[in-house]
Amino acid sequence: MSTDPFSGMFGDIFNMLGQQGPDAWFQTATQLGLNIARGEDGDPNPQPTERQRLEELAVLVSRHVDSLLGVSSDAQITGVNRSALTIAALNQWKPLIAPMLERLAFDAEPGDVDAENEAAMMAQLAATIGPLFTGFQMGSVAGHFSERAWSLAVLPLPRLDPTRLLVVNNLTSFAEAWSLERDEVYVFALAQEFVAALVLSQPGTSDALRALLIDAVREASAAQSNLIERLQSMINPDDLSELMSNPAALLDGIEVPEESDATRAINAATSVLLAFFERAASDITESILGPRPALSEAYARHRRSDARGEDAAAALFGIATQGPHHDAAKRFVAHLSETHGLGVFDALLRVDGLPSAHELDAPDEWYERVSNSPLA
């Protein structure tokens, strides 16, 4: 008979977690994300009149987007609440988070467990519970992401499909907070989301972006490698009980990855995508409604002061939402649009269209490359 005081406790935990199935981490993320997204107001659905106005303007905006990028697409848009955006974000992020979960399983494989070895027991516990803590983190980020985000366009990740969603109540709150006309906010948000959905759902573009994200997410995971060590050090039952009752505490102090070739590559690509989406939205809004300087200023301030949820979401994938690369991306887009016209960015629809970290500071070299590409 074993005298190990931990064996019974660990056995109970393993049985409990094993019954939840391999997808338990994502179920945890979904439940937590929706709980946060509902907020204090219960997350009401948008007013039918506001959804109708959004759909009316979508027809006009889609024509401008098609003209800009030389494509033909439908004008369908779905006005949603925060919960719907949270679910859409989680479904989009799920396949991109897989490398992080694979690392957790690799770092603490459960096959070599010795019933008399507490450290080995903790290794198995870490391998079992590690993905659940990823679920806690991902769900928390997704819920806070939808608190103020208008759409998925603010985080340029590969799209599984070209479905376009806008959180109507977030748009109306933004318009009221900055004393803007709703139509101008709607047109800008529609244009931003239409362009983003079109670019990010292209097979070539999404494949190229996904390849960059594999390395970036792996490095973000490496920055969290202390997760396993911290779990393995908690072999005191009191500590473990506290951990299970307050799992978010385990995430305290996790560091973001340091700058590397992988982070420079993903930051160059995503910052240019964001700068292009914003510039395209501004130009289309001006074409339809005339100059809107107050809107441009309000959006810039909104991104600086109200985007904490978006910043946290980006960090999951090793993407930095602040830094000199964003200023460089704005200069990149401004220079090329003024020299060659904004239509030059139809190259972003191709597998070789994303700029490299070097090209971010050399936009003419990017232009020469994509213009002479056999895919052009």
Image (spheres, rainbow, N blue to C red):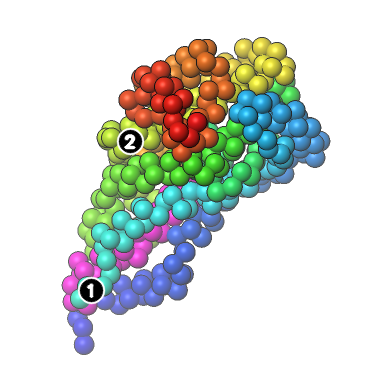
Placement of 236 over or under 187, stated as above or below: below
Placement of 48 over or under 235, stated as above or below: above
Q: Which residue is mark 2?
A: 263
Give the amino acid type for the residue marked by disc 2 in the picture.
Answer: Thr
Instruction: Answer few, some or many: residues within 10 Å of disc 2's Cα (few below 14, many 20 plus, some between 14 and 19).
Output: many
Residue at 38% x, 35% y: name it. Answer: 266
Badge number at residue 251 = none
Residue at 35% x, 65% y: name it. Answer: 128
Badge number at residue 113 = 1
Q: Earlier in the sequence, mark 1 or mark 2?
A: 1
Residue at 35% x, 52% y: name it. Answer: 100
Res 354 quadrant in image: top left
Give the amino acid type for the residue marked by disc 1 in the picture.
Answer: Val
Task: Report, in whole angstroms, how far the alpha carbon at label 1 lies from the one at label 2.
Answer: 36 Å
Residue 299 in the image: x percent, y percent? 57, 22
Q: Observer-nearest residue: 304 or 214?
A: 214
Q: Which residues are magenta?
A: 115-144
Residue at 27% x, 35% y: name it. Answer: 260
Instruction: Answer few, some or many: residues within 10 Å of disc 1's Cα (few below 14, many 20 plus, some between 14 and 19).
Output: some
Q: Main secondary structure of the magenta part?
A: helix
**Is residue 142 a member of the stretch shown in magenta?**
yes
Residue 350 in the image: x percent, y percent? 49, 36
Mark 1–mark 2 contact, CB under 8 Å?
A: no
- Find the residue positioned furthest to the bottom: 1
Question: In the shown orientation, is residue 35 left or right of residue 130?
Answer: right
The reply to whether residue 215 is visible in this rendering is: yes
Residue 365 in the image: x percent, y percent? 38, 21
Res 237 quadrant in image: bottom left
Quarter of the figure that contains the N terminus: bottom left
Q: Observer-nearest residue: 273 or 247?
A: 273
**Is residue 68 a member of the stretch shown in magenta?**
no
